[in-house]
Image: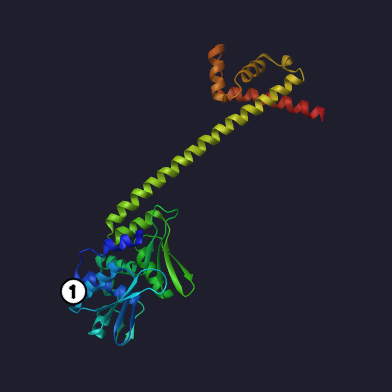
Amino acid sequence: MSFTAEVKDEVTRLDTTRLENISELSAIVRLSSTIGKNIDIVIENNAVARRIFKLIKEIYDISPSITVRNKKLGKGLTYILTIQSKVPDILNDLSILDSGNYLNIPKEYVISDEEQLRAYLRGVFLVSGSVNDPKTSRYHLEFILDTKEYSEFVSKLLNSYNLNSKIIKREKNYTVYIKEAEKISDFLRVIKAFSAVMYFEDIRIYRDHKNMTNRLNNCEQANIDKVFLTAARQVKDIEKLYELDMVDLLDEKLREVIEYRMKYKESSLQELADIISLETGDNITKSGLNHRFRKIREIVEKLENKQS
């Protein structure tokens, strides 16, 4: 079962009030039905189909007929729930029809309080939403919606929870999407998919920790590489001075660091400073040692310029 299916399965088992049920069903019918003499609700998820049947029966005391068909492409089934009675009353009650006119956006009473708003977004997710498993390479939650106006409406509802949703047009439809892991987790809390939240957070924390470890390892390796490159460059400069018989002409301090660098060719500047301080009894800092190597570099550059 996909992570999307697991989330939908979880929220279809929630115990909710009549007002919440109306809000949830309003979104479901708005997004997944064909309306004529009857209301035909087309669903591809068995758990969602059962949820819709339950809501209709509890709210309106009618049992929709159910037709099951094989999908035209791929595996799986399509469930068609048909409502044949009380059609105008149901559509008006769900704020899909008003005075004979179809509403693209429901009236305020459908989302008038916190629980109804959560229920409405839950209904939108059940029939148009999908969310990537956090184990995959990217975080992504999206809703496929039919009109720009309705997409802006859903995005506004999502962003009332600071979820930072965005809208993009894809062919004939509009996609409202959320990319940030923390915001996706927040959305799952909004629709009360609490088991999914715990799973999502466990994976997210593990991935974030793993990424941090990788970054630290990469940083450590970069530092090691830098130490070797610096030491190799210093050894090369010293070898040039030996080649030109210039070492004995340098002052005592420079000869001292040359001797220790050639003895400890792969040590970092800090390690070399510690060794010199310990063996000679003269304290020298990393900064002081670096200053001496800069002097050696300047001498080598002057010699190379004279040769060219």
Query: On the rendered structure, is 117 left or right of 72?
Result: left
What residue is shown at x 31% (from left), y 60% (from top)?
Answer: 7
| 299 vs 5: above or below | above
Residue 75, how many percent across, how many down? Answer: 38, 68
Residue 223, how many percent across, how many down? Answer: 54, 33
Q: What residue type is labelled 1?
A: Glu
Pick the residue in front: 68 or 281: 68
Residue 37, how many percent across, how many down? Answer: 30, 88
Res 158 → quadrant: bottom left
Res 74 → quadrant: bottom left
Pick the residue in front: 218 or 290: 218
Query: On the rendered structure, is 3 left or right of 280?
Result: left
Query: On the rendered structure, is 101 left or right of 215?
Result: left
Q: Crowding near pointer 1: few (<14 within 10 Å), some, many (20+)?
A: few
How many numbered callouts?
A: 1
Res 297 → quadrant: top right
Split into 4 quadrants, where in the image is the N terminus? bottom left
Split into 4 quadrants, where in the image is the C terminus? top right
Query: On the rendered structure, is 79 left or right of 231?
Result: left
| SS of the residue under disc 1 | helix
Where does label 1 land, which residue?
58
Residue 150, how many percent across, how many down? Answer: 39, 74
Pick the residue in front: 10 or 220: 10
Q: How is the image coloured?
A: rainbow
What residue is shown at x 40% (from left), y 43% (from top)?
Answer: 209
